[in-house]
Image: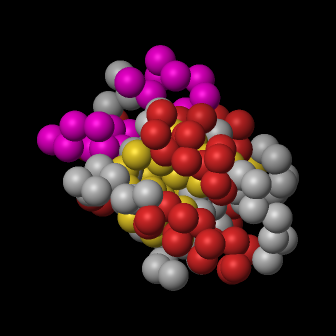
Amino acid sequence: MTAFECTLCGKCCMNAGGHLIEIEKRLTGRDFLCRQKIVGGTFRARVEDRFVDAFKDTTESSRHQTWCPFLRPLPGKEGKYGCTIHNSRPYICRSYACCTMRIFAGDGREVGKVQGRRSLVTEDDTLRRCWDESVAPLGTDDDIAWRAEVAGILGRAGYRVEAYE
């Protein structure tokens, strides 16, 4: 298995961030006292030097109440988003991985991912059909064995699988 690598799509922080983090107080131009809404407690967040200009632009983030208050589009990188407090983000953010497996078509395009323990997210009808017919019926509770079986099934169907720890 390989280590999870973020693709900077921002979806995790677009959909859950606003429910996890709340800015309580601005301490300096770059430092904030924040509350972790679900687990409680506070933490100090610092906007990193490399993100100061991006953080100042609230055009997009102010329109989306579900976004983490520290998520910003990356300048010059269409469709890529960054955590402006990455080095001081709270544990809940540090421990989050958006998926346990990514699935790629033969041409290298990502066509699906497994979120949570075993939930497929895809818009690829062929992958969905293969999953429903061959993967969903698998009866093992052993996650390591299950991932190996899934990689084999999808590999024979022409897909490449990356599983993450």
Left or right of 40 in this view: 92: left
Q: Residue at x 70, y 79 (%)?
A: 145
Question: Does the magenta-highlighted stretch encompass residue 89?
Answer: no
Q: Please tell me whether residue 21 is drawn above or below residue 48 in the rendered image.
A: above
Q: Please tell me whether residue 90 is drawn above or below residue 164 in the rendered image.
A: above
Start-end of magenta stretch: 60-81
Quarter residue 155 falls in: bottom left
In front: 107, or 72?
A: 107
Q: Which percent across, then down, holds residue 128? A: 55, 40
Q: Quadrant of the C terminus?
A: bottom right
In front: 130, or 58?
A: 130
Q: How many numbered discs sit on the rendered protein? A: 0
In front: 121, or 140?
A: 140
Question: Does the magenta-highlighted stretch encompass residue 66?
Answer: yes
Q: Residue furthest left?
A: 76
Q: Residue at x 60, y 29 (%)?
A: 66
Q: Which percent across, then down, holds residue 36? A: 74, 50
Q: Residue at x 60, y 77 (%)?
A: 148
Q: Please tell me whether residue 93 is drawn above or below residue 148 in the rendered image.
A: above
Quarter residue 89 falls in: bottom right
Q: Which percent across, then down, holds residue 147? A: 63, 72
Left or right of 1 in this view: 158: left
- Please identify the dominant SS of the magenta region: loop
Q: Please tell me whether residue 128 is drawn above or below residue 2 in the rendered image.
A: above
Q: Residue furthest top?
A: 63
Q: Which percent across, then down, holds residue 129? A: 56, 40
The answer to whether residue 86 is visible is no
The answer to whether residue 126 is visible is yes
Give the colour scheme of this rendering. Answer: secondary structure
Left or right of 23 in this view: 139: right
